[in-house]
Image: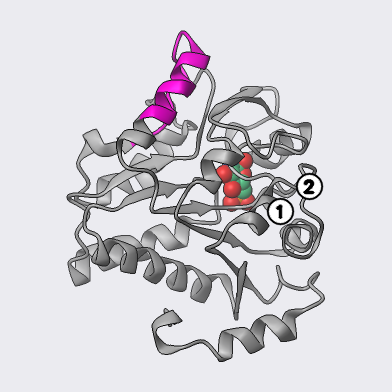
Amino acid sequence: MEVLIRDNAETGCVLGARIIARVVRENPAAVLGLATGRTPLRLYQELIRLHRDEGLDFSRVTTFNLDEYVGLPATHPQSYRHFMQENLFRHLNLDPARTHVPDGTAADLPTECRAYEQKIAAAGGIDLQLLGLGRNGHIGFNEPTGSLRSRTWVKILSEQTLRDNSAVFGSVEAMPRHALTMGIGTILDARQILLLAFGPTKVPAVAQMIEGPLTAMCPGSALQLHPRAMVILEEESATGLRSTAHYRWIDRHKLAWQRYD
Ligand code: GLP
């Protein structure tokens, strides 16, 4: 795992956008795995700026989002499809037919999950998967104890996750209890992984993910198995780590082609 600690979330997000932009420049038909939540918002703004001001072309890019709430149609303001539409898709020159978010309204959810896996495979797999990190260490909606080899599936949201995500719904009671999410096995199949985690609430999960044992109790720790996983932190979210001097040393001694900023 490559740990990159930046001064603040702003510079972390700009770096993240550069990493994604390089993937798209090197392969204009890249397949991107995308995430929702507050964390990647600034990164998405930077991708929009790169598209607008520097001509970053998304016309041949395919996207697959990690997850979606069960029961929320694409038009629902709290659906992840709506979030992506508003915060990214409508600002880029993506082909709408190549943007994929699991369908939380599907009548047969297991079939929808299998179909999602098939679509990812048919697109040639994911080149880069963007991730945030739940306060309890979840990635996508893979909550603690979920299988490290899982494929896209239906998950029951933990009480902690419901509380953490309830602000936009107004209350926990108003929230769906279930979600469709890529499994941890699906995520690990991506050729490159980029996880962002900012702020004080993520300190314990970040420490467990990077320096704790590989365990289903911290789904993010599965990234320890991935040959090309990058984690972007800022000073605050890195405060629970023991080996920050080592991560900074590695960062300083990278070869030119390994650098993004
Ligand atoms: C949500 C999403 C995750 C996201 C996480 C963190 O539950 N399903 O994909 O990474 O919570 O959210 P935030 O970035 O808002 O802290």
Q: Residues within 10 Å of mark 2 (few under 14, many from 20)?
A: some
Taking the spot 48% from the left edge, 68% from the top edge, the residue there is 13
Q: Earlier in the sequence, mark 2 or mark 1?
A: 2
Provide residue 46's location: percent of width, then percent of height.
36, 66
Q: What span is colored magenta in the figure?
A: 100-118
Taking the view exactly as shown, the residue that stands out farthest to the top is 107
Provide residue 45's location: percent of width, then percent of height.
37, 61
**From what the image shows, is residue 111 above or below residue 133?**
above
Provide residue 248's location: percent of width, then percent of height.
65, 85
Q: Are marks 2 and 1 in contact (CB under 8 Å)?
A: yes
Taking the spot 39% from the left edge, 35% from the top edge, the residue there is 82
Amino acid on which disc 2 is placed: Thr
Would you identify the image quadrant in which residue 209 lies?
A: bottom right
Q: Residues within 10 Å of mark 1 (few under 14, many from 20)?
A: many
Would you identify the image quadrant in which residue 229 lies?
A: bottom right
Amino acid on which disc 1 is placed: Ser
Residue 215: give its label: 2
Res 81 visible: yes
Taking the spot 61% from the left edge, 22% from the top edge, the residue there is 176
Q: Is residue 49 magenta?
A: no
